[in-house]
Image (cartoon, rainbow, N blue to C red):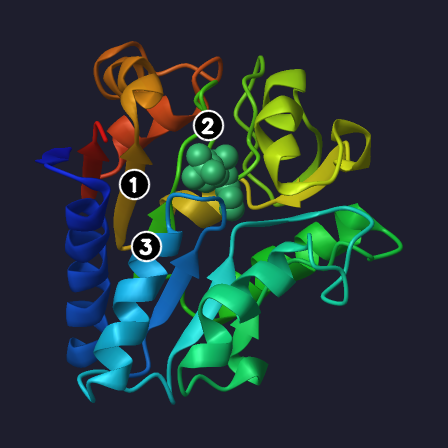
């Protein structure tokens, strides 16, 4: 794994956006795997800046997002579909029909998971997958567990994750308790993976997933088995 320590969150965002921008320039119809959460927001801002400066064309780009809360759809401003529209898609020339987020309102989440994995496969997999990491080592919403789940699947969120995400909701009670997330198959088939982590509080988990044992108790540790991972960390 390649490790880059950035001097600031802004620098982290510029580095991550630079890697994604190079991919879009090299392959204008590339497939980007995208993440939500607070860490990638700066990366998306940098991508928007590059688009506004005429450096990037998203018209042929396709995207697949990692996860969505169960029970929410794009009309909810807490949904990950809304987040992506608001933080990236509404500001660049991407065709929204080419953007994909798991359907949090699907009647049968396991069928939705199968549909999503088929979609990822039909796109030929992602060229770059952007990831954040939870304090418990989760990627997407793959929480610490006894096993790694390969398929896109329904998860019950850990208390730690609900606590962390409560900052985006009016109260903790409003945080959905379940989500649908890409499993390890869809994440690991990416040709390239970028993981962004920001803040002193993420330092320990970054050390642990990069250098500790590969175990489903630290879901991100599976990335040690991928051949092209860049970790970009910034303390502040
Ligand atoms: C979001 C996601 C999560 C976040 C993680 C870190 O799509 O998949 O794994 O990346 O919870 O979130 P932040 O960046 O808010 O610390």
Residue 121 seen anywhere in this rendered image of the structure: no
Front tag of 3 and 2: 3
* 197 left or right of 111 in image: left
Name above or below for residue 87 compared with residue 12.
Answer: below
Q: How far across and down, in percent of the image, does residue 202 sit?
A: 33, 22
Tag 3 residue: 42
Give the position of the C terminus as an image quadrant: top left
1 and 2 marks in contact (CB < 8 Å): no
Looking at this view, is 209 or 148 the one in front? 209
Give the residue at x 28% y 20%. Answer: 200
Tag 2 secondary structure: loop
Tag 1 residue: 195
Name above or below for residue 229 compared with residue 123.
Answer: above
State which quadrant residue 28 falls in: bottom left
* 190 left or right of 15 in image: right
Tag 2 residue: 134
State which quadrant residue 26 falls in: bottom left
3 and 1 marks in contact (CB < 8 Å): no
Looking at this view, is 65 or 172 the one in front? 172
């Amino acid at each position: 794994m390649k490790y880059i320590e950035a001097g600031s969150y802004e620098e982290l965002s510029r580095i991550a956006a630079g890697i994604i921008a190079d991919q879009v320039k090299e392959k204008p119809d590339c497939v980007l795997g995208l993440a939500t959460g607070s860490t990638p927001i700066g990366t998306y801002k940098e991508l928007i800046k590059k688009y506004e400066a005429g450096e990037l064309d998203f018209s042929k780009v396709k995207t697949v997002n990692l996860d969505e809360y169960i029970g929410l759809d794009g009309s909810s401003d807490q949904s990950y579909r809304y987040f992506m529209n608001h933080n990236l898609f509404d500001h660049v020339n991407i065709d929204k029909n080419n953007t994909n987020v798991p359907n949090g309102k699907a009647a049968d989440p396991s069928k939705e998971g199968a549909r999503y994995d088929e979609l990822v496969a039909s796109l030929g997999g992602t060229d770059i997958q952007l990831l954040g990491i939870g304090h418990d080592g989760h990627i997407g919403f793959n929480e610490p567990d006894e096993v790694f789940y390969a398929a896109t699947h329904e998860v019950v969120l850990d208390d730690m994750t609900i606590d962390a995400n409560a900052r985006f909701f009016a109260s903790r009670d409003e945080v959905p308790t379940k989500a649908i997330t890409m499993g390890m198959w869809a994440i690991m088939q990416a040709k390239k993976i970028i993981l962004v982590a920001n803040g002193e509080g993420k330092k320990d988990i970054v050390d642990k997933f990069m250098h500790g044992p590969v175990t489903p108790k630290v879901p991100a540790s599976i990335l040690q088995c991928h051949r092209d991972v860049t970790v970009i960390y910034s303390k502040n």
